[in-house]
Image: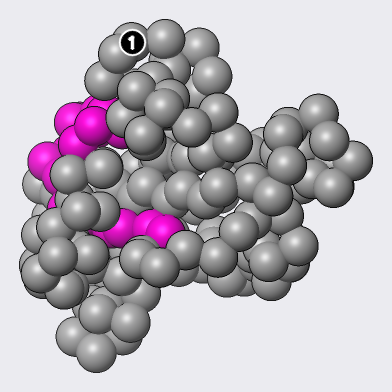
Amino acid sequence: MSGPAAYHVAQMNWGRLRAGMDDPVVAPFVEALDRVNGVADRAAGFVWRLTDAGMTAPENDPAEVMAKDPRIAVTLSVWETAQDLVHFVHRTVHGQFLARRAEWFEESEGPTYVIWPIPAGHRPTLAEGKARLDALATNGASDNAYDFKYLSRRGSTTEAV
């Protein structure tokens, strides 16, 4: 019998909206946020996510961390395993909205998400996620900052890398 996992996986994703949050162009995305977040909150392996209330600290303020751009939307969450994260992202209603990303978000030259291992119980900050995202963009995928392709190549979707 094994004990609790020593590591979980954190993920941060971001995008620059095509218009402000109150614009009809992004209304379907904005209207779906509570529904998709609710699915995440109930998903197998879900541990934690940064909520709007948690974004008041400077290290979690999207405007401060993500280039002072009010059209940046960002999420940060923790999952027991990479497999749990993969399931939520691609095999729940979230996948339907992910497929429509181009309708609501501008294209980005660099990565729009990053995954990394964290000690179980740790709650990452957006600043930490941004540093991992920058490392992924600069150095490519590694065991410390990776994407789904990296997990697939390693065959590592059942536990933290």
* Quarter location, residue 65: top left
Q: Measured along the vertical axis of the image, is residue 85 above or below residue 69?
A: below
Q: Which residue is mark 1?
A: 57
Q: Mark 1: which amino acid?
A: Ala
Q: Residue at x 54, y 60 (%)?
A: 88
Q: Position of residue 47 (x, y in %)?
A: 39, 38
Q: Residue at x 76, y 62 (%)?
A: 103
Q: Measured along the vertical axis of the image, is residue 121 above or below residue 73?
A: above
Q: Which residues are magenta?
A: 112-128
Closer-to-camera residue (12/1): 12
Q: Measured along the vertical axis of the image, is residue 123 above or below residue 78?
A: above
Left or right: 24 as drawn, with respect to 137: right
Q: Position of residue 8 (x, y in %)?
A: 23, 49
Count neighbours of disc 1 (C-alpha within 10 A) and say few if under 14, some if 14 to 19, many if 20 or more.
few
Residue 117 is inside the magenta segment: yes
Left or right: 39 as drawn, with respect to 113: right
Q: Position of residue 60 (x, y in %)?
A: 34, 22
Element class at badge 1: loop
Camera sees residue 155:
no
Quadrant of image for the N terminus: bottom left
Q: Residue at x 34, y 23 (%)?
A: 64
Colour scheme used in the picture? one colour
Left or right: 24 as drawn, with respect to 128: right
Q: Residue furthest bottom?
A: 153
* Quarter location, residue 148: bottom left
Q: Measured along the vertical axis of the image, is residue 92 above or below residue 8?
A: below
Quadrant of image for the C terminus: bottom left
Q: Residue at x 18, y 31 (%)?
A: 122
